[in-house]
Amino acid sequence: MKNKKRTAAVLLIIFLVIIASVLAVCNTDKAETSGGINMGVDIYYAQKGDSRLVSENREIDGVSVYGMALSALEKMREMPKNENLVSAIPSSVAVTGISVSQKNINVDLSDDYLSLSAGQEMMCRSAIVWTLTGLYFVDGVSISVSGNPIKKINGEDIGIMTRENLIINAEIDPEPTNSSKKIVLYFTDSSAQKLVKEERRIEVNTNDSIEKYVMEAIIAGPQEQGHLPTVPSETKIRDIKTADGICYVDLSEDFVTKHSGTEQGELLTIYSIVDTLTQLPNIEKVQFLIEGEKRNEFKGNIEFDKPFAPKEIDG
């Protein structure tokens, strides 16, 4: 009789332990489902007027790899704390889905991604890769547009991107990034009295600002018969960058000393550069610098210390 009671007591204890374990698991699942997992991750944003990415540590949440990756992407769309930063994913581009395969994540974007400029596309892509690979469970990221993988210039799929093959804020990116861009350059006509257009297709590296390539093309001179150069061929580009809609063009002393002069000649030179550069979507005005400094005058005829807006110059 005593043995039966002892056995019943043991069974009761085992039953209670099992019940307690089940309740503990249920409570844990409920807590994770309602509260999720919170963790800090570096979210990458674009710096205004620059081609650099800057991170801010933000808290994300989720109960799965999918949930935390989605939370990180949502944080990328929010306004950063630093007022000098903006989202690297343009508002026109929507994240239409994500999928997880082992330690890799694919991010599917809307068709608007294909309309981005080369610089915007590189910033957007790099920010997504660097943000998501900041999660401890993500090694690589691929990007697709409406289900189709994004491609290199040669037509091959870009595939999985990592921090090792997508370097940010560097002079050279190991990922092939050359692309062809159609631009309109301004030179003078054969009488050197008015500006004329010349369409050109140039090869650019998306890690560099397109402004640099445009200025190099202007200095190289026209290719069409009857068009004359406006900038001395000896001119060197010391620096060129855009901030808050103003493109700062820093040129060597040769730009001034090798110029032939005359008021009309100065105007044609200045506005061949200004009218060309302001066709780019992020440029409204051009500020010239010579050897890193503003000059009050160009060759003695034109005030030269203020930013120039585009205008048509005729003889």
Image: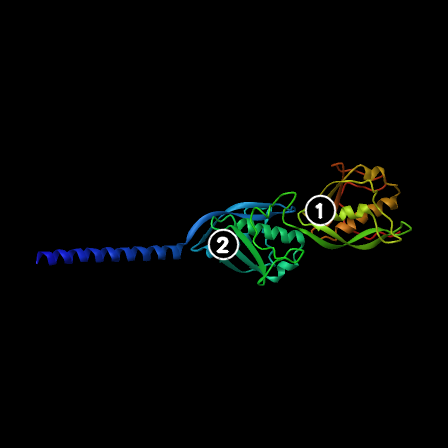
- Using residue 69 as the reference point, say whether residue 226 is left or right of it: right
Residue at the extreme right: 191
Are there few (<14), some (14-19), or many (20+) residues within 10 Å of tag 1?
Answer: some
| Viewer-side residue, 39 vs 311 | 39
Q: Residue at x 17, y 55 (%)?
A: 10
Up-down: is 145 above or below 72? below
- Using residue 200 as the reference point, say whether residue 32 is left or right of it: left
Residue 268's x, y, as percent? Answer: 84, 48
Up-down: is 108 above or below 82? below
| Viewer-side residue, 216 vs 299 | 216
Contact between marks 1 and 2 (CB within 8 A): the answer is no
Up-down: is 149 above or below 308? below
Q: Residue at x 41, y 54 (%)?
A: 36
Of pointers 1 and 2, the one earlier in the residue sequence: 2
Are there few (<14), some (14-19), or many (20+) residues within 10 Å of tag 2?
Answer: many
What residue is shown with label 1? 246
Q: Secondary structure at mark 2?
A: helix
| Mark 1 vs mark 2: in front | 2
What residue is shown with label 2? 69
Please tell me the numbered disc located at residue 85.
Answer: none
